[in-house]
Image (cartoon, rainbow, N blue to C red):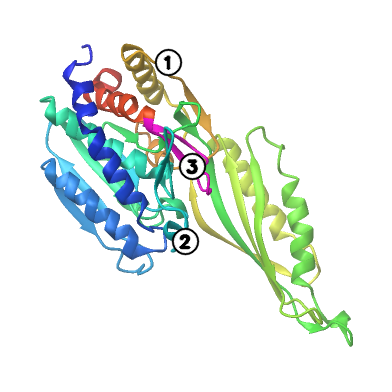
């Protein structure tokens, strides 16, 4: 079935509203730990979903007052039931919008969260609205979560619960800077390691001390040697904090690790090796306590995901632009759905780049084409998954 000519027209007609809504959302401080801002974004998402006739559920994290609400919108329709996922939080602290609010610079939109992922979140909503305008009514569950940038600790169980009721997942992160969509992602484990030693006076009786900082330094060096042991594994000690004063042997030291791998086998092997290394004291009398803060299993390119990618590439050809799929080192909620066997495709928003930085951008010239592609993929996903 070719793409209905009315569909690109419906997307183009919505572009002015898209741009206005993008400005409004970007100008909201909504870091993961800024629940008031995240909930303002949730208000906007709920309004758009209700316009589409969705039955909306808003879930407050009762045991996490530092997080915003999860939004789940269910839209009745025809064909396979698709799970669309986007997130409402950014990595930026309160006050970022005041420093660098939304602006259009040539053909680029700039500001906190333009690419990651307010542009993609809006693309999903506008793709659905364009489909409805074209008389196409797919069966959709739309998830907007508040905590993706910290590993989705609250929303992941809800997403997993939805998976068995769906035929495929389309994740609305923006396309890579070169335009690629994403068919595979590395898994990630965020690990906190606390070294427990013994304090002592560093000048009078240092021999009584057991330095947690020294143990951490030795272990960080050993842990970094895991880079390259397996082809896809990367490990980074990104945060280290310990001790109290220079004249006190440090009793504690905390290290935060980022461990990633592209396959489940390499991910499991590397994580087991981290645990093995940390079980052996690097300094006599200092023990290491390991705690997982967050994580995602790898998103491997399954046959179902490959068929979705092939369909997206064919549809892009009908829209007269080239498209490729790729693997990336960053994790997203696509890891969650793919890890439990649901065909999943990611990177389906407009083109963007320099995420998590002051230079973040969204290519406005890509908005209509990529939103049309997303709408066409939603309308025809049954080809790939039946």
Q: Earlier in the sequence, mark 2 or mark 1?
A: 2
The quadrant of the image that shows the C terminus is top left
Q: Residue 51: where, in percent of width, then height?
A: 12, 43
The quadrant of the image that shows the N terminus is top left
Vertical placement of residue 129 versus 280, above or below: above
The residues tagged by marks 3 and 1 sit, at their Cα atoms, a distance apart of 25 Å
**Residue occupying image coordinates x 27% and y 63%:** 60
Residue 322: mark in rendering: 1
Residue 331: mark in rendering: 3
Crowd rating for badge 1 (residues with CA inside 10 Å; few <14, some 14–19, many 20+)? few
The residues tagged by marks 2 and 3 sit, at their Cα atoms, a distance apart of 21 Å
Which residue lies under the disc numbered 2? Answer: 93
Membership of 359 in magenta stretch = yes
Vertical placement of residue 38 versus 49, above or below: below
On screen, residue 266 versus residue 116, left or right, reads: right
Q: Mark 3 touching mark 1, by CB under 8 A?
A: no
> What span is in magenta?
349-364
**Residue occupying image coordinates x 53% and y 44%:** 359
Q: Earlier in the sequence, mark 2 or mark 3?
A: 2
Work out whether residue 323 or residue 76 is closer to the camera in this orientation and state it. 323
The residues tagged by marks 2 and 1 sit, at their Cα atoms, a distance apart of 37 Å
Q: Residue 6: where, in percent of width, then height?
A: 16, 19
Q: Mark 2 touching mark 1, by CB under 8 A?
A: no
Does any portion of residue 355 appear in the rendered image?
A: yes
- Of marks 3 and 1, the one in the foreground: 1
- Element under label 1? loop
Q: Residue 70: where, in percent of width, then height?
A: 28, 55
**Residue occupying image coordinates x 46% and y 40%:** 361
- Element under label 3? loop
Residue 305 occupies which quadrant of the picture? top left
Q: Earlier in the sequence, mark 3 or mark 1?
A: 1
């Amino acid at each position: 079935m070719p793409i209905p000519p009315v569909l690109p027209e419906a997307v183009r007609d919505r572009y002015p509203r898209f741009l206005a809504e993008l400005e409004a959302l970007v100008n909201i401080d909504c870091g993961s730990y800024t629940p008031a801002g995240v909930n303002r974004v949730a208000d906007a998402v709920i309004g758009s979903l209700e316009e589409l006739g969705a039955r909306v559920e808003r879930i407050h994290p009762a045991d996490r007052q530092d997080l915003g609400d999860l939004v789940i919108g269910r839209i009745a329709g025809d064909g396979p039931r698709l799970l669309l996922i986007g997130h409402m939080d950014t990595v930026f602290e309160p006050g970022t919008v005041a420093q660098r609010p939304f602006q259009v610079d040539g053909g680029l939109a700039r500001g906190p969260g333009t690419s990651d992922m307010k542009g993609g979140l809006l693309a999903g909503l506008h793709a659905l609205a364009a489909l409805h305008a074209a008389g196409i009514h797919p069966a959709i569950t739309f998830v907007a979560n508040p905590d993706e940038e910290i590993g989705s600790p609250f929303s992941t169980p809800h997403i997993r619960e939805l998976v068995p009721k769906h035929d495929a997942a389309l994740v609305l992160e923006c396309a890579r800077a070169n335009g690629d969509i994403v068919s595979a992602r590395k898994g990630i484990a965020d690990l906190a390691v606390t070294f427990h030693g013994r304090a002592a006076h560093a000048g009078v009786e240092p021999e009584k001390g057991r330095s947690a900082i020294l143990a951490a330094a030795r272990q960080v060096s050993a842990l970094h040697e895991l880079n390259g042991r397996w082809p896809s594994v990367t490990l980074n000690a990104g945060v280290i904090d310990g001790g109290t004063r220079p004249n006190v042997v440090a009793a504690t030291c905390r290290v935060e690790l980022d461990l990633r791998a592209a396959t489940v086998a390499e991910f499991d092997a590397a994580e087991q090796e981290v645990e093995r290394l940390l079980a052996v004291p690097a300094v006599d009398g200092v023990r290491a306590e390991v705690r997982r803060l967050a994580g995602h299993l790898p998103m491997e390119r399954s046959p179902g995901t490959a068929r979705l990618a092939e369909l997206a590439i064919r549809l892009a050809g009908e829209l007269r632009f080239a498209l490729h799929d790729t693997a990336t080192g960053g994790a997203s909620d696509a890891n969650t759905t793919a890890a439990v066997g649901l065909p999943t495709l990611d990177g389906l928003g407009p083109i963007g780049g320099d995420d998590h930085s002051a230079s973040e951008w969204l290519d406005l010239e890509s908005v209509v084409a990529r939103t049309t592609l997303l709408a066409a993929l939603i309308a025809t996903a049954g080809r790939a998954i039946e």
